[in-house]
Amino acid sequence: MSESTGPAGPPQSTHPIMGPDDVARALRRMAHEIVERHRGSNNLVVVGVQRGGAPLAAYLAAQLSDILEAPLEHVDLDVSFFRDDIGSAPLKDAAPTTLSRDLRGRVVILVDDVLFTGRTVRAALNALLSFGRPDAVDLAVLVDRGHRELPLRADYVGKNLPTSREERVRAGLDGVWIERAS
Amino acid sequence: MSRYVLRGGVVVGPTEARRADVLVDEGRIISVGTDLDVGRAEELDCTGAWVGPAYVDLHSHLREPGAEAAETIHSGARAGVRGGYGALVAMPNTEPALDSVSLVRDVLERGRSSALDVAVCAAITVGRRGERLAPLGDLAALGVRLFSDDGTGVANPLVMRRALEYARPLGVRLAQHCEDASLCAGGVMNEGEWSRRLGLGGRPAIAEEIMVARDLDLLRLTGGRLHLLHLSTARAVGLALAARAEGLDVTFEVTPHHLVLDESACAAYDPIMKVHPPLRAASDVAALGELLRQGRLDAVATDHAPHAPETKDQPFDEAPAGMLGLEHAASVVHEVLGANRPLDLFRVL
Amino acid sequence: MRTIRGGHLLTLEGVDRVQVVDVLDTAESFVEVHHRTIRKVPALTGRVVASLFFEESTRTRLSFETAAKRLSADVISLAVAASSVKKGESLRDTISTIEALGLDAVVLRHRSSGASEQVARFVPHVHVINAGDGQHQHPTQGLLDAFTVRQVLAERRGTTGRESGAELFDGLRVLIVGDVLHSRVARSDIAVYRALGANVRVVGPGTLVPRELTEWGVEVSYDLDESLEWAQVIGLLRLQSERGSGEFVPSLGEFATHYGLTSARLTTLDPRTLVMHPGPMNRGVEIDNAVADSAHSLVTRQVANGVPVRMAVLYLTVAGGDGR
């Protein structure tokens, strides 16, 4: 669930749950877990969910290619047209999708910033299917904050963060914050 | 009928308006004055009201015969009564056109049983086709005083010249719808920035002014009496005023809608705003209002032109032209006069 | 200008740069969708879009219906030109009948200027998309023309239209040639190019380009050859002979000689000049075969871009509300 509010800077008043170094460490660990699970696989593709997942996917892909000592493709996926709240909430501006090839035979590592209700991931899974039928899709998130509304779970989690529903979570390469709803 | 007295109003006469009561008995005005001894009479409180002669509309389309779904002589008369009218002139562009003694007699007959006095303006040419003269002499003998092909103008200058020459010794007046049809071809609103922006064909002001100028020249040649219907541009009125100053017997009218609505009213493509001649530029609307306030307009005539809703409710370019007027003309004139000017109001209506 | 998001698209007159860029950016996403294995998105699942063409235009109708289907909307298609409307049924009656079927959007093509404005008044809660009304506006054509220009100029810079926003249009010299007076495409093109910051000039014979058109904020010229030198983008208009425009010029031949983009004139063009035409083309009148098929011509791209731009318009109008 992309809870991040875009390019605005970190809030001044709250203390970060994770700093940039914590985020880098978590992503590095997740990269190792991915390699562990898909040892010997040469068909990985990292797909970042626009917008919050895109920079994390880029970083994760770099870590993976470091570990694997091979270049690894990473692309972005916009899920606006697949959301289940179209027409009942203000439209989100569509962001670029750089994923363009058929995913048949590939293993997709889907990357998002925050896993919340699960609805964005649901939309992303449907969007992925319009690129053909991948062999498998794994989900990697920097933060799992609970409150799922769909039967989904992440395969790789940077940090499990108990929250209340009313709070907002911002998560990116620069850190993780909880913002109280005003 | 009974006996009643109008109390407390301002009685408007041709030259003055003054506080007075009016005693009416069996439909006749018995006396006008203050401190009237009325005997037994029903009292009608007219405090704050103007009391004057009922208005006369020179230009009403009553649609009968032919389009009774839009209006009838009786329904039009009722609309007139609501608007303060006591008499109106029924225009001849019915179906068939009022171009014969029998048709005109029939309309006059129906008018006699209506709520007010109905006079008839008969057609100038047979079928309003602009070719052969209608029986102007027979119709004049029947009492018709005004002739027009209104809805369209008499396009052919030779036909118009003959009509003026023929009408002159009969003592009747010809009323012209001044729009040159060829300059208006394909036009549905005033030609100008608005028509170009809205993608609607234009009817230019010059189409009206050319026809006014032509007919005034013909009148200068033939003599006789000419009335110019629904003038809508400042220049057209200026031409008419100048011709009269020169001695020609020309009169003219302006409609209520041309006094308050300009071409921008067409921007929503509401076919109610489609009229011929079209709603003009804001500058023309302002100029006509000023002429009214200066007392230089001969008459405000409604060009009351109803259409059945299902025929009017069409795309703008396909809808028939025409707007209602009888019920609100007085309030429009009052608003444009803009002050406490009862004499001016009763003079033009 | 009412907003496009959650509203109608009736005219481009008065549209602002932000709204145009919103449509163009969204359309760019739909171009990308077009390259997927499955070219359909579920954005308008369960929505009903009616295409009502009171005037036949196969290509525009197909473009809109393809767009609606790619968005997963249900499409009711009524080629009214051949239906009951000819039997005296009013526009309002037709709309009421269709509305009873439960509509989210109406795509309307009509021979009368203002018809879509009127329909939007009859059914205010249905999103009305003007697919061309008389001689008034053809908003999606204007938007797809601007989209196509932005796409090509961005490609030349090695960037995407989205990244460039509207900056590519600043001071861009756009020439519109031919029957401007009767053209709904011209009205929409002029509005959209001006909103994006381009300089627009119109050129054509005096009867079809009245000198008063300067009131639209465009330059008016009667010299095609000089204007071709000036222009970076040339938008040709169809001479609407079927609407009587033929009576505005002595002959089609004379029109072609003075205002047609002939193969002879083609040789004088800067190689980077773009040539556009909304179709259908009168080959040999406003455009020669050699021009239509030359490297300058964006005609094929314009047709291809029709679908993503119309997807963007349907998506933004139908789904772009505040979720009431």
Image: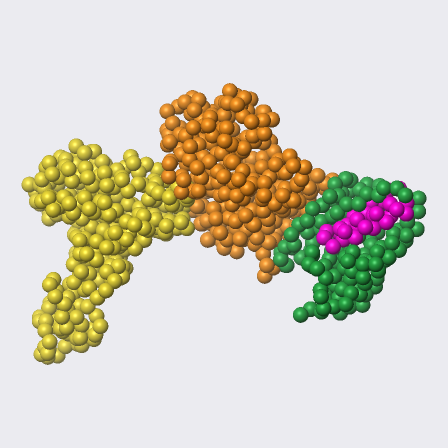
Chain colours: A green, B yellow, C orange
Q: Which residue corresponds to the image point at 35% horizontal and 37% vertical from the top-left?
A: B186
Residue B103, visible in the rendered structure? no
> In this image, B150 relative to C316: left or right?
left
**Residue at x 81% of width, y 56% of height:** A141
C179 and C120: which is toward the camera: C179
Q: Is residue A159 magenta?
A: no
In the rendered image, residue C174, in percent from the top left (x then y), is placed at: 51, 36
In which quadrant is the N terminus of chain A drawn?
bottom right
Identify the magenta region. A41-68
Query: In this image, C83 relative to C154: left or right?
Result: left
Q: Is residue B264 visible?
A: yes
Percent of width and height locating residue A152? 81, 58
Residue C126 place in picture, x, y as percent: 53, 53
Instruction: Work out which residue is located at the far top of the displayed protein and give it.
Output: C264
Vertically, is C154 above or below B57?
Answer: above
The residue at 37%/29% (across/down) is C247
Task: Give B20 or C168, whichever is nearer the viewer.
Answer: C168
Determine if the magenta segment contains residue A67.
Answer: yes
Q: Quadrant of the C terminus of chain A?
A: bottom right
Q: Quadrant of residue A72?
A: top right
Q: Is residue C255 above or below residue C220?
A: above
